[in-house]
Image: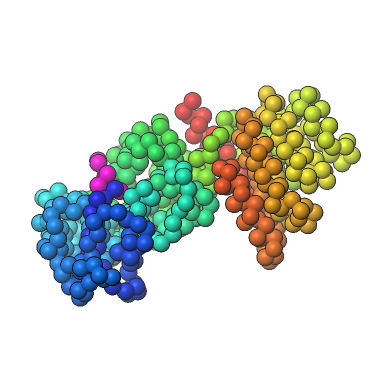
Amino acid sequence: MDLDSLFYPKSIAVIGASAKFGGGKIPYYQILKLRGYKGDLYPVNPKYDEIDGVKFYSSIDDLPEGIDLAIVTAPFRESLNIMKAAARKKIKFIHFFTAGFGETGNNNLEKELLDVAKKNGTRIVGPNCIGIYCSEAGVSFGFSVQENSSMNIGFFGQSGGVTSSFVKSAISNRIGLNKVVSYGNQIDIGAEDYLEYFAKDEKIKIIAGYVEDLKDPRAFLNALKRATEAKPVILLKGGMTEVGAKAAASHTGAMASNFLIWSSAMRQHGAILVENFEQMMNLAMLGICEKPPQGPRVGFLVAGGGEAVTFTDLATLGGLSLPELQKNTQELISQKISDVNTSTANPVDLGMFGFDFNIMAHTIMAMDQDDCIDVIIPFLSVDFISTFQRDQIEDGPGIIIEAAKKAKKPVIPILSKCSQDDIDMEKTRISMFSSFRDAGLPVFAATQDCVYSISKYLEWAGRHR
């Protein structure tokens, strides 16, 4: 399905636009103006004459013919008349933000909307969803602006809340979004249509999705198989449990399905399945990095033996390995440290020397020339850095970043913080995290998150080599 006019609309009508904020509606008209949407924008509401000098249209029938996208925020009771008017005006896509449809048992209204759509060629997004985000087109459902040159994530979400959270989290984590859609009850355009469209988009490198139910499972699986041959597809299922499925039914009218059957089918068709939102975000971050993992052999370096042991356990349980470093690698590392309370085998325990970013960088470069290692993971403690390395808070991350750029292998820092009530430490964490992410390095807050993400990514990569 060609969705270009939906994600790159040259004209948009906002049905039920308001001259003021509030009223329980997303202010789409104001958002589009502030986001710099360059196309023709038509606010429609008989209650107003103008907004900031721009004419309000009293009805859809007053609009020019052939508008690409209409966004509807009017009450659901008006939706059928709005749908008929949109069809008369040959509007290509109509997005119903409005709720009150199948999720509340109002299935007949959905059928009536769909009948009008099929007869006239207007396609429906939703209803009961927040709609479209496309960074290139200046189309959005939120005020947040992303300043990132690598916009290469596509996301489709059945929940408006999850979709909005994905966008906010991606922006905060410097994960570049290309296209996003919240698709709600999907009475017309289904999850499989968005998946297929994103799979064909060469600008999208990773696809992520939150799914509660599928209207056409066979079509989705076919689209999924084609998509995963080209790029990773990360899926989070809403309603994995019986209780969760009941919640999904009241949320988007989703029909319950057996999760074991669902998950088996998704895996067989190449999807990467995650269990929670944080895992989905972490995998998206890892998947778009310039040098993703190519194998499970990990080189770990840290200032302290306990973290080395913990990482070894978690990595082994996660299917990764820590091969002993080659003799020449260990000799190179030992040039910068003493042999007291340290280990150069792997995991590498640098002891107190690990509080020196230059020695950390030296160790990274030594590991990079080791044929036994696929991925290099430096462990950095914000608590210790704030205590022992305050003079390196500004320059330290840059030293690691420079080593990572020179390295042929991926460098994936873990930036750990134990203290939860220290504002200065949080400022340090944000500063270092931002430096790493702005440089394009994936960075994790916990060892288990790092291990999980690498293992899951390699699971997909192993099937497509």
Residue visible at 47% across and 57% down? 168
Query: Is 93 placed above or below 106 here?
Result: above
Q: Quadrant of residue 113?
A: bottom left
Q: How is the image coloured?
A: rainbow
Residue 216 percent location from the top left of the image: 28, 44
Decide if residue 114 is in sight here. Answer: no
Residue 361 falls within the magenta-colored stretch: no
Residue 66 percent location from the top left of the image: 15, 52
Q: Quadrant of residue 426?
A: bottom right
Residue 210 percent location from the top left of the image: 41, 50
Q: Specify whether 328 is left or right of 78.
A: right
Q: Specify whether 319 is left or right of 103.
A: right
- So how many labels did they put on this image? 0
Q: Nearer the viewer, residue 25 or 227?
A: 25
Residue visible at 36% across and 50% down? 134
What residue span does the magenta drawing correspond to? 1-7
The N terminus - image quarter: top left
Residue 397 percent location from the top left of the image: 67, 46
Q: Specify whether 258 is left or right of 374.
A: left
View extreme (right): residue: 340
Q: Quadrant of residue 247?
A: bottom left
Q: Nearer the viewer, residue 272 or 373?
A: 373
Decide if residue 95 is in sight here. Answer: yes
Residue visible at 57% across and 30% down? 294
Q: Specify whether 161 is left or right of 432.
A: left
